[in-house]
């Protein structure tokens, strides 16, 4: 049995970390944010995944109301998101490419590698975001808290019996 569909769903739910990460983004609103016309036109050679992470980065930037004084810290956050999306995305693509030829053990190792990449990406994002969050005034921290408190929810399962 292959876990590829599970990975894809999990990765997309968190924002294709961010690849999926990513992602690795809090809340459904960010995960569903389509790329803007400007970002699509300005980078026609970018992959859909790259445009998607850039759209999520822009959406988060806008939602957090990042100020000019916070841009240096923000750049580290955005780069952590990009790096995670690239690394995790490559592992997911490799996993999908090799899915038919993987043994059960290969499948489990590949699954672990994707999950570890996601965890590593979250660790790097957390470190970068802590610096940004620490520089925010209390009102802006409340906005960040609200943005990050939005989580995708699973529909309630009917009880059997």
Image (tube, rainbow, N blue to C red):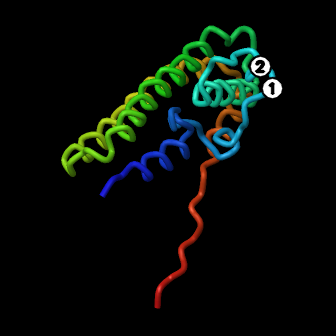
65 shown above or below 147: above
Q: Quadrant of residue 44?
A: top right
Label 2: element kind: helix
68 shown above or below 12: above
Pick the residue in front: 114 or 98: 98
User: From the viewer's perspective, is 88 left or right of 152?
Assistant: left
Q: Which mark is residue 106?
A: none
Residue drawn at the location 50% of the way across and 33% of the way down:
19
| Residue 22 in sight in this render | no
Residue 111 point in image, percent of width and height: 32, 43
The residue labelled by disc 2 is 41
Label 1: element kind: helix
User: From the viewer's perspective, is 116 left or right of 43?
Assistant: left
Residue 63 point in image, percent of width and height: 74, 31
**In the current view of this chain or complex, which residue is farthest to the bottom?**
161
Residue 60 point in image, percent of width and height: 68, 29
Q: Quadrant of residue 48?
A: top right
The N terminus lies in quadrant: bottom left
Pick the residue in front: 159 or 128: 159
Residue drawn at the location 44% of the way across and 52% of the way down:
5
Q: CA distance from mark 2 to mark 1?
A: 6 Å
Residue 10 point in image, percent of width and height: 48, 48
Q: Quadrant of residue 62?
A: top right
Mark 2 and mark 1 in contact? Answer it, CB < 8 Å.
yes
| Residue 96 in sight in this render | yes
Residue drawn at the location 41% of the way across and 36% of the way down:
92
Q: Which mark is residue 37?
A: 1
127 shown above or below 157: above
């Amino acid at each position: 049995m292959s876990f590829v569909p599970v990975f894809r769903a999990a990765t997309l739910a968190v924002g294709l970390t961010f690849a999926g990460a990513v992602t690795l983004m809090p809340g459904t609103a960010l995960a569903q944010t389509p790329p803007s016309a400007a970002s699509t036109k300005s980078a026609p050679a970018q992959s859909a995944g790259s445009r998607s992470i850039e759209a999520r980065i822009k959406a988060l930037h806008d939602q957090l109301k990042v100020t000019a004084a916070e841009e240096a810290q923000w750049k580290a956050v955005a780069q952590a998101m990009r790096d995670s999306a690239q690394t995790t995305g490559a592992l997911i693509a490799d996993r999908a490419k090799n899915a038919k030829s993987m043994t059960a053990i290969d499948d489990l190792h590949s699954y672990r590698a994707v999950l570890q990449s996601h965890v590593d990406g979250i660790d790097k994002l957390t470190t970068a975001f802590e610096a940004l969050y620490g520089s925010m005034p209390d009102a802006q921290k409340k906005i960040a808290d609200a943005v990050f408190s939005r989580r995708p929810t699973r529909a309630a399962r009917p009880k059997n019996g």
